[in-house]
Image (cartoon, rainbow, N blue to C red):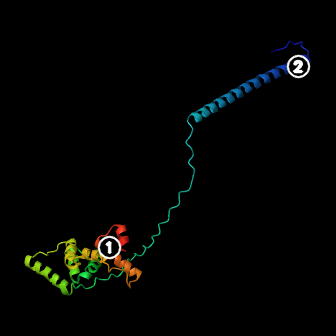
Amino acid sequence: MSLPLDTPQGIANALGYLQHYLHELTERQNVSKSNINSTLAALTVQLQQLTQLVANPPPPAIPNTPPPPVPSPPVSLPPPPPVRWTRPKLSCPPDFNGERHNGRTFLNSCSLYIRLALEQFHDEQERILWALTFFKGGRAAKWSENVFCQEADTGIFPIQTWGDFEQQFRLHFFPANTEADAINALEGTSYHQGNQTVDDYLDSFQALVSDAGYTDPRTQVVKF
């Protein structure tokens, strides 16, 4: 804006200063407005980025852990030594001559040996033949001979099972009248302890009671 020519110099200077100051203020305002707009634009962009980050969070970071250590190969231990089981030494039955008073003892001895060494016998016939090897004299040897003679005549061994052998053995080699003899001994007046020890008398009494078939405890007390 131009001033009249007659304007005093002081006023003209003042007006010039004011115009210059106003121009600077206008420029400052424009610069401030531009800075504000830039700041707003930057904030808007950051707000959009934050919104996307909240809506789609990044996957969790995998920690950079070292790989697990490689396991050492297992140490192979030598197998334990096998446990060796040894069977106690078994006594064979005594030789049998056929006397009836020894028949029960011989048969019990054979049965005990078979039970403890069952794996030694393939079948029941082997058990029977093994028992016959102890029939060494008297009536026992004669009876064994008759058994083999029957086999030679028929081609079939006459005793098929161990149960049959036990039945035949009791018939031929057990006391014939065991029950009657035991009853007569217990009922007789001559049965008493005498010179026997208590243990011997008790063993003898229990054997007689068993053979006699006395199962009633009251009867056993009376006979004792």
Q: CA distance from mark 2 to mark 1?
A: 158 Å
Q: Position of residue 96 (x, y in %)?
A: 24, 84
Left or right? Give the position of 60 relative to 216: right
The residue that mark 2 highlights is 14
**Residue flagged by tag 2: what amino acid is it?**
Ala
Query: Could you tell me which residue is drawn at 41 percent across and 80 percent down?
Result: 198
Give the position of the C terminus as an image quadrant.
Answer: bottom left
Query: Could you tell me which residue is drawn at 64 percent across and 29 percent down?
Result: 44
Q: Position of residue 190 (x, y in %)?
A: 32, 81
Q: Position of residue 194 (x, y in %)?
A: 37, 83
Mark 2 against mark 1, which lies toward the viewer? 1
Left or right? Give the position of 14 relative to 218: right
**Residue flagged by tag 1: what amino acid is it?**
Val
Height in image: 26 above or below 224? above
Left or right? Give the position of 102 relative to 78: left
Height in image: 11 above or below 178? above
Q: Is residue 167 visible?
A: yes
Q: Position of residue 128 (x, y in %)?
A: 21, 77
Q: Residue furthest bottom?
A: 137
Query: Could you tell me which residue is drawn at 32 percent across and 76 percent down?
Result: 207
Q: Quadrant of residue 115?
A: bottom left
The residue that mark 1 highlights is 209
Q: Residues within 10 Å of mark 2 (few under 14, many from 20)?
A: few
Q: Quadrant of residue 191?
A: bottom left
Mark 2 or mark 1: name the one nearer the start of the chain: 2
Q: Viewer-proximal residue, 148 or 178? A: 178
